[in-house]
Amino acid sequence: MPGDHKRQGFTAPGEDARGRPLLSPFLFHAPRAAGFTLVELLIAVFILTVVTSTIYTAYRGTFRLISETEYEGEVYESARAVMTRLQQDLGALSSYKGEFLFVAKRQDMTGGDFMEVSFLSAAHIEFDADEPQGGIAAIRYLVEEDKYTADTRAAGEGPPSYRLVRVDALFDNRPRDAAATPQGFALCEHIQSFAWKFYDPDGKEHETWDSGGDAEGQKKRAPAVVEVRLDLANPRDRERPYRFSTRFHLPVNRVDPDGYPNL
């Protein structure tokens, strides 16, 4: 009969000694919902942040390196263009009526060591189709502040920026208002220094030059040797600019009493 096993000291499966059904503890827990705990989400966000910052740093370093490489390429190309143009102009140095006209003076600018240099040369560049080809030209090199940076500086923004300009006009010894209008172009930007040194035939060094003055070794003469130093701004370290320097020998730099160039 049912229940006889209790009296006989036996328990049925799923019951305790008193005949009460045994209940599994797992029956009291509802099935676990699908998803992530807060700790798991925080760990995932942390890993994502680390990976993203690493990738961003790598990309930023790569783009900075590319930008710096491009700027350095522009710097070296600009310096090469300036030195090549100077070589052509000084190599064609010319005299006028038995005199060499060569004047070099410091520019009154606070942004760097700049010089303005003027001389006569046969390396004239025609800017106008109606302009006669060839002839002696009055060539002038000078540094001027970039107009855009001048405006930003007036507004109190950014450091000064300068550019090197070459001005060229046929020389005919007429008054300035009657002579041809000088024309020129910017040779180079981001100039930090444009300095010259001059040496007379005896090897004496001069800081400036004026062939129209009475200084010994300079009157009616051009220098025998010029040394040019060009500094271009380094945006990473202004105290360490890109520096280029060279010397030009001017074998024809004076005229003898008979009007012939002297070597």
Image (spheres, rainbow, N blue to C red):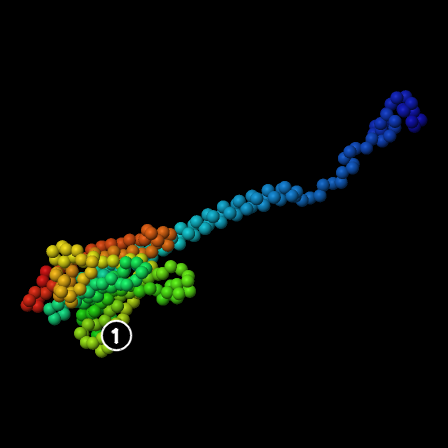
Q: Residue at x 24, y 77 (%)?
A: 177
Whether residue 179 is situated above or below residue 162 in the rendered picture: below
Q: Position of residue 57 (x, y in %)?
A: 47, 48
Q: Position of residue 21 (x, y in %)?
A: 85, 31
Whether residue 14 is situated above or below residue 42 in the rendered picture: above
Whether residue 140 is situated above or below residue 76 in the rendered picture: below
Q: Nearer the viewer, residue 67 or 19?
A: 67
Whether residue 10 is situated above or below residue 251 in the rendered picture: above
Identify the residue position indicated by label 1 in the image.
181
Q: Residue furthest right?
A: 1
Q: Nearer the viewer, residue 39 or 70?
A: 39
Q: Position of residue 214 (x, y in %)?
A: 13, 65
Q: Residue at x 19, y 76 (%)?
A: 174
Q: Position of residue 166 (x, y in %)?
A: 26, 66
Look at label 1 and name its amino acid.
Thr
Left or right of 262, for residue 17:
right
- Indicate the secondary structure of the residue bearing disc 1: loop
Residue 156 seen by the camera: yes
